Image (cartoon, rainbow, N blue to C red):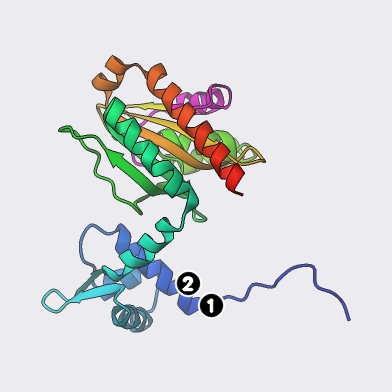
Amino acid sequence: MTATTGTRRRQVPAVTRAIAILRQLGRSTEPVGVNQLARELDLVPSTCLHILRVLMDEGLVTFDQQSKRYTIGIGILSIARSAIQKNTFASLIEPRLTELSTNFGGTAIATELDTTDHMVVVALSRANQPFRLQVDLGSRFPALISATGRCHAAFNLTDVAEGRLKASFAKLHWDLPPDFPTWLSEVKRIRTDGFAVDRGNYISGVTVLAVPFLDAGGRMTHSIVSVDITERIEQIGVSALISEMLRIRDNVSELMIAGA
């Protein structure tokens, strides 16, 4: 008998399709019909409909009888809330985000890199001021976008060919897109600086600061993000805000190591 060196992963198409449907509905800004959904995911309409009905029964998808369209259901919230509550990083970082936004203003966010190359918001705090970034727990963003994306490229994609990185960069959506050579030079500088700054590229008139959490292998796993109107961040001073974010990062990292 020959011993196997790894676990063989069996494909489960129905599960894969159901997850794809939930993600597509989650990304959509308006209800979607079954035929449109099937086209977007390259599914047979009857298969798509069958999966949607199962997801409806579980409360994960809702159906509007008048428009004959589907939306993500509130049943997904209990699953997401449970995952976030059990996330040690989220429970440690949340009170510190509140402190950060209270002392400096703006919106303070903590993200985690998921397995699909997206950043997921796992904790956040908003200051009581007119400008607020529209973001919620569980929101997902492309891993390469904005300041967090620069950190992701700097610490996780060092072995990716420049041509492939450029192709991924070209698919991103910005208010004021940086040119690729400038973006790439900023990515390289982050490896020395230890933080990233997005001045109005992702959202015009808004500055996004990001500080990465790195694992033992030097790969980014999480980040602290501070978002505010550029003028207000310039009044506070980027260095002052980054210094506090680095302090929080180091403190939470020590607690995570101690609790491991």
| Callout 2: SS | helix
**Residue 177 inside the magenta-drawn segment:** yes
Q: Quadrant of residue 73?
A: bottom left
Residue at x 21%, y 66% (from the top left corner):
31
| Callout 1: SS | loop
Neighbours of disc 1 within 10 Å: few (<14), some (14-19), many (20+): few
Magenta segment: 173-196
Callout 1 touching callout 2 (CB < 8 Å)? yes
Question: In screen coordinates, is 191 left or right of 50?
Answer: right
Q: Which mark is residue 16?
A: 2
Q: Is residue 248 visible?
A: yes
Residue at x 33%, y 79% (from the top left corner):
58
Q: CA distance from mark 1 to mark 2?
A: 6 Å
Neighbours of disc 2 within 10 Å: few (<14), some (14-19), many (20+): few
Query: Looking at numbered disc 2 in the image, what kind of residue is underneath it?
Result: Thr
The one of 62 and 182 positioned closer to us in this rendering: 62
Outermost residue on the left side: it is 66
The quadrant the N terminus occupies is bottom right
Q: Which mark is residue 37?
A: none
The one of 39 and 141 positioned closer to us in this rendering: 141
**Residue 244 inside the magenta-drawn segment:** no
